[in-house]
Image: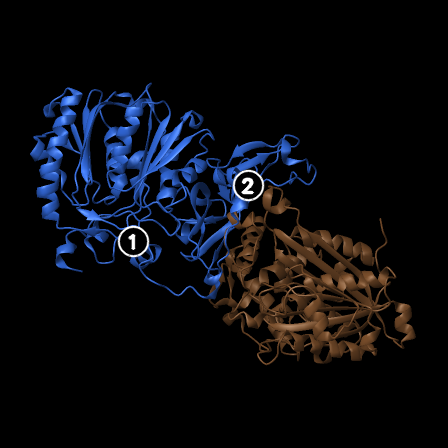
Chain colours: A brown, B blue
Amino acid sequence: MAKGIKDKVAVLGMGCSKFGERWDIGTEMLLAEAFDEALADAGIERKQIEAAWYGSCLDSVNVGNSAIPASVALRLDGIAVSRVENMCATGTEALRGAAYAVASGAVDIALAIGAEKLKDTGYGGLPPGYKGTLNDLWLPLGSAPAGFAQLASGYRTKHQISKEELKRALAHVSWKSHQNGVLSPKAHLRKEVSMETILNAPMIAEPLGLFDCCGVSDGAACAIVTTPEIARALGKKDMVTIKAIQLSISSGVESSSNSWDGSYVRNTRNAAKRAYEEAGITKPREQISLMEVHDCFSITELVTMEDLFVSEEGHAVRDVLDGFYDREGGGVPCQVDGGLKCFGHPIGASGLRMAYENYNQLLGRAGKRQLHNPSLGLSHNLGGVPYLGIAAISILGLH
Amino acid sequence: MAPSLAGAAKGYRAFCSWDEDAVTMAVEAGRDCLRGADASAITSLVVASTTLPYADLQNSTIVAGALALPETLSTADATGSARCAISALIAMFDSAHEGAMLIASEKPHAKPASTQEMTYGAAAAAVTLGHDGVIARTLGHASVSAYFVDHFRASGEVHDYFWEERWIRDEGYAKIVPGVVKTALAKAGVGIADINHLVMASPIRGAAQPVAKSIGFSGKIADALDTECGYSGAAHGLLMLAQVLENVKAGERILVIGFGQGADALILEATGKVSEVPGRRGVSAALADRYPTEDYLRMLSFYGEIGLEWGMRGEKTGKAALTEAYRSSRQLASFQAGKCRACGTVQFPQLAYCVNDACKAPSSQFDQVSLVDAPAKILTYTADWLSYHPAPPLFVGFVQFDNGARLLMETVDAPSSAVDVGVPVRMVFRIKERDNIRGFNRYFWKATPINL
């Protein structure tokens, strides 16, 4: 098996726009906000970028199809720019493209940038997607929370957990992220919320209430990557390198055969196993310093704790309620920047936003929410729905 | 409500959910009629209705697909009058070929606060025709044509326009029907005293009594199902006949009258073999299986009689690819899963390769397995309040079939208390989604709990 890209690619600079309801600016300005910060952080000029990957998910908002609008917005004149789209894994997909270009030796410096302008849809939540001509004829309607809510009924049936206990653990997941979001200046939602408020919120898709669902935001995030050698030559001393990037996409096993019990996300397990192997991680619960996972809904984060092999199967509810994933809970802090729940979820930017938090934590730049001496940060995206989707994991670490 | 209408406010009236129409009801009636029978022996299908969803797209073809009838089938829609089903039945008797099938189905629309709103119901009934093992045989029939407009509905209109009931009864029923009955009796070689049952459907309650009197009939007048279903237009005569046939004795004779711009009279004789076709749910069981509701607003909304706010999510109006609809028509219409000969995995939809991780054999060798009557249970579910749905909440989740197939499905016709993991469900043919701009329905199968 191939050795992977561990330590072959260094993060030269990163940027992230303020997330939230950015009524005042369009996608082009969001891109620029993240790009300018990353360029300054990298200490390079625009013309040093040799290839770029631009990620955005929805054609109905943003700047349109292809890489052209992003290239125009960032004035990336004449270089190779690709647009990637892989639902909520789009940001990590963009990072993968840039990292592989550097690792292969095809270019010295590459850009990954993702953005989404969800607040141009005119309503809360995500617009309904297109399904392809065949699925369009038979797949039922259903919102994103409905897709993930399926996990709740599958999980509690498998582990014989009462609706009430599961709901309480889900509420703690969101409560914790709101606590963290307060300390995150660029986050969309920066307000503490009580357990009672979370538990009593209006139902969106049973058992998920309003506070079990993440923020729908505008935002952009960006990474500039190169080789460790070039980074050193450019004067970088504390260096963050990519330890692993892995994706897993459904083949239909979960949705069209009876080999999946509805209680977990097969793709996350597949991607995690390969990412740990690539990164040389053998004991994730002990080795990982922090995690930014795909908490699009509280149930997703809870189940992900098991799918990443940090909680034992069936034990995530207990770990969550014990505070193992809280910022100061003595375990593995999760969603330190507020997560999708509170930092926000502009789809195409999210994977890069997660990497941005891990990068800043590793470099000790995370301000009031800085963790003590982190060495490995994991980010995790889940595109599509649990039974028909994409899991993307990237692991950053100190070099 | 006008005091004169209040008297009609008793019992139940059947109405369609947003995802039901004359086609979906025809499928449900057709399935019951074919239960335990050989669908591959059906050679022709007529669907009779005045409320078919398509003016130019043969509705019986959609029904035939859902019933998995043979591709060599001849199909036709019969429409244009409330008596179209009885007229079609007579025509089919005359053509006397084996394997003929007639389904009458009607989704009548009534204006809010109209008399019709109190009396209309939605229903479908189905019969198959042949020579051997029949439960009733035809003795004779007669027809008469007359430009008598008791009600009408112009093309493209939704609601019926009625003339005065007294005129319909006295000048229409009392004067047009006796003549045609007399001719039919003569052709059948029997007298009115030899008739045991009278089936006469009418939107006017109690209309059969004076008709019976005018023709000298003293037998049993068939239940018009006023308080159980309501008048179901072109389907109602066949529905009433189906109920009569459930308990009819050998040798008993039934007079069926169809009325509308003239009249049809048909005389049947029961063979006593009704007990030899077991397994049918029939009219009585279908009525007993009702899902009662007093949600008047939902009914208005389902029939387009009230404009509710659906939110921006309701604006998405993708058009169905008709090319794809044709390519996948067998698979989707008759809900065909593929069973891999290499590993035995049953799967839907059928794509290029087997879904089994350890197999992945080409699908060209799949055997076809119908999921229509396959036992199944709910595996996961949620009540989705966010998605656009014409009858919120949308119950959506995985349905697991005992044969191994599974797919994401909508669960319908159930209160939230009846939807849970492990609940046994059966399949029903429904409108999956409606393209409101182009008027095209995507028909597919949904799940409904077997026990409410």
What's the amino acid at mark 1? Answer: Glu
Mark 2 on the same chain as mark 1: yes
**Drawn side of residue A169 relative to residue A305, left or right:** left
- Dot placed on the residue nearer the N-terminal end, 2 or 1: 1
* Residue B128 % position (x, y): 34, 28
In terms of depth relative to the viewer, which is nearer, B4 or B92?
A: B92
Image quadrant where residue B172 sits = top left
* Residue identifier under label 2: B327
Residue A115, numbered label? none
To which chain does the residue with label 2 belong?
B
The reply to whether residue A97 is visible in this rendering is: yes
* Residue B80 % position (x, y): 28, 42
In terms of depth relative to the viewer, which is nearer, B262 or B376?
A: B262
* Residue shown at the point (92%, 74%) measured from the top left: A233
Task: Reply above or below: B227 against B115.
Answer: above
Image quadrant where residue B267 sits = top left
Task: Reply above or below: A185 against A350.
Answer: below
Q: Quadrant of the N terminus of chain B?
A: bottom left
* Residue A145 % position (x, y): 54, 60
Task: Reply above or below: A330 against B334.
Answer: below
Residue B157, numbered label? 1
The total of numbered circles placed on residues is 2
